[in-house]
Every structure is written in structure tokens, then in C-alpha cells.
Image (cartoon, rainbow, N blue to C red):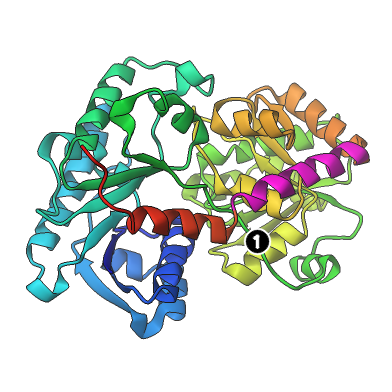
Amino acid sequence: MKLLIVEPEASGHRMSLYVRLLVRACVARRWAVHLLTTRRAIEHSGFALVQEEAGAHLRILLMEDVRVSEQTHAAALVANQIRYYGAIDRAFKRFTADELPDLVYMMHLDYFDKVLAIRGSPFGAVPFAGMLMDVKHHRRSMGTGPATRSDALYDWLLRRVLRIPTLRAVTVIDETFMAFAASRPEYRRVRYVPDVGEVTGTDTREVSRAVLGVPARCRVVLVYGTLTRRKGVQELLEAVASERVPADVSVLLAGSQDAETAALLRGPVAQDLFSRRRLFVSDGFHDDVLEHRVFNAADAVWIGYVEGFHGSSGVLHQAGSMSLPVITSAAGLIGWLNQRYELGVTVDPNDKRATAAAIYELFADDRRRASCGANGKRLAERHSIDAFQRALCEVIDSKPAVS
């Protein structure tokens, strides 16, 4: 098997988790693996982890950097998809005969899935597959999000993608979408791959806290990943700063900060928490050692995403792998998983008083925290590195679906 993985970006878990684990599985299976990516991505710390592991087993092919608009209105999002599609199409057209793979795997079809539905595959006659991370038109019917005016359009577009002759499969990490798709024969090329979340390391809790400067007395709520507005950092800090939350409950922010988060940490609420040693920061990209350190130092994990986020988060399963309870928004797939498997407490992050009360209740009940952590551990076993790699490689190595 000669596999081409396409991933033009490296932020979040794109390179450090998803690409790295797929490359690792390919090397173990003795597949020839190439990666089509950008210079911007290979300059990211996440790519260094991929390259360090794979070494000479991974061949890198470059495409042009894609200029992406940060605006979120429909026209800007479509323009971004057109840019990604065009850059990948132009890069693939330059491939020599010996560079052509047996199959292309798009790590994130979300880069151009709407354009793909209209223009068809940019990979010519070469079979391809890919993962949709943010499929959403099923959410209203499955109770994991609101209906939108575009649901019917998104369904139509996905069905067009699924009819592309060279498509091997579309993979999703949302188990509720699989339930939605089960009764729809036109979705037979959709395959489920469990989102991955596994934290491993050897440091003791005492060592982790000592290195981070977190006192033993603190009970720590961790916020992990790329720290943007969507993470709900402001909402958490305001809740923890309220009088309803015990004074020994603190926040640990771990990950790269965007400009808005950095400005927030210079503000009065954050500065007050800093002064009372109730706010700690582990800044920048986190490799495996640093990742384990911050989870190991925590007592609970905040996944109170805001701004209408209804998708999945590997942080949920990372928390579970460390037997940590979670505090999540009630909405979306994360809230659905939390409530279905009893992983912690759900909140409306925009309701400061209710959020503070939920945090108080969680830390006041040792038995509940332990039970939620144990539930998370059991769920995380289904979302292990091995489970993710095995499911993904089965899809990649499968025979084409019958049309």
C-alpha cells in the first residue's frame, strides 16, 4: 500500500495527534507513506513530532501555503474551501508517476467538502477517503444541536460527495451521526472511527505539580489545547473567581494562547486569580511529556466550549484516560457524551452563577468525582490510540464499496 496523507495545517491536534498516529500505524504495517503539506505546517512544533517518529519512512511533498480568512460568514468560509481545493488540486497535478499513491487520505475533508461536492475529486482517478470532523446536519434530529437553515443543503452536498466514483469512504468521529446514517442507504460509504484521546507518562502527581508550580493544596481545573475564545476561558475564570467556588479550586491553562486569550490574562479577573495563586499557566505547544504533566496535575477538566460549538473534542477522552471528571457545556456532542456516560457535570458556560454552583458541587462530592473519572476511563478505552489506528487503517485498506 502506498498511501498519501493530505494535511495542510498543523494547529491543534492535526499533526501532533491525527497525522502522527496514522503515520505510525502505516510504518508499523510497512506501508509506503507520503505526506502532502505546507511549509507553514512543517515549521510548526506538531510536525516535528511526526518527523521525529517517522524519520526516513515518511516522504514529504509540499503544496503552497493557503491564505485563510479568519471571518466566519458564509462567503468567507466558501472562499477558504475554494482556496484549499485549488491548492491541493494544483499540487496533485504536479505529481510524477512514481509519486501517485494507491489511495489518498484527507485527514480533514472539512477543508473543502462543500467544493468537493460540486467539483468532484481533485485526485483524478486515484481512490480517496477522508474524515469529516464537523458534520452537523444531523444534530437537530439526534438532540445534539440546533437545526439550521442549511441542514437540507448540507445533506444534499454530502450525498453528492458520497456518490463520487473514486471515493472509498467518508469517516466520522461522531457516533450519533452513525445512528443517523444507519437508516439511510445513500450513506453506506460513511464509516465510524473513534476519536482518539490517550495520555501516557511516568511522572508522579507530586513531580508534575512541583514542575508547574502548583501547590499540593490546590484542586485544579485544567483547560487544555489551543486557547482561543471558543474554549470558554473567560467564562471559567469568572465562575471560579466568584464567592461560590471554594478558595482552593484553581485553574491551569495549558496550551498556545491566541491574542484574545493573552489579553484576557492581563485583565483584572485573571490578575486577581494570579495574585491569589488560583491561576496557573503552561504556555505554548505541549509535547507528550508536557501533555501528561498538565493532566497529571489536574483534578477535573474544563470543556465548556462556547460560541455555538457542538462538535467532538479529543480532550474529553484524554481526561477519561487519566480518570478525571469533566465540566462540559450541556449542548452538542460533548454534552451528549457527558450525560450519556456520566462523565462529570454539564453547565451553561454563559451562566456564571450556575457554572460556579456546578463546580462547587463537583468538588464537594469525592465519591461522584471518582465515579465520573471511572466512567471516563472505561469510555476512553474505546478511544485508545490502538482503537483509532485499527479502525482508520481498516477503512484505508478496505475494498471499494459497491455503488
Q: Residue at x 46, y 17 (%)?
A: 140
Main SS category, magenta section = helix
Q: Which residue lies furthest to the bottom in this view?
A: 56
351 versus 100 height, above or below: above
Range covered by the magenta-colored residues: 367-383
Screen quadrant of the N terminus: bottom left
Q: Which residue is drawn at 89% across and 42% down?
A: 247
Q: Residue at x 23, y 60 (%)?
A: 103
Screen quadrant of the C terminus: top left
Snapshot quadrant of residue 298: bottom right
Q: 177 left or right of 129? A: right
Near mark 1 (Cα within 10 A), the count class, few <14, some 14-19 or many ≥20, is: many
Residues 277 and 124: in front is 124
Does dot 1 land on a helix, a strand or a loop?
Answer: loop
315 versus 345 height, above or below: below
Q: Name the residue under label 1.
A: 199
40 versus 75 height, above or below: below
Query: Any magenta on residue 379?
Result: yes
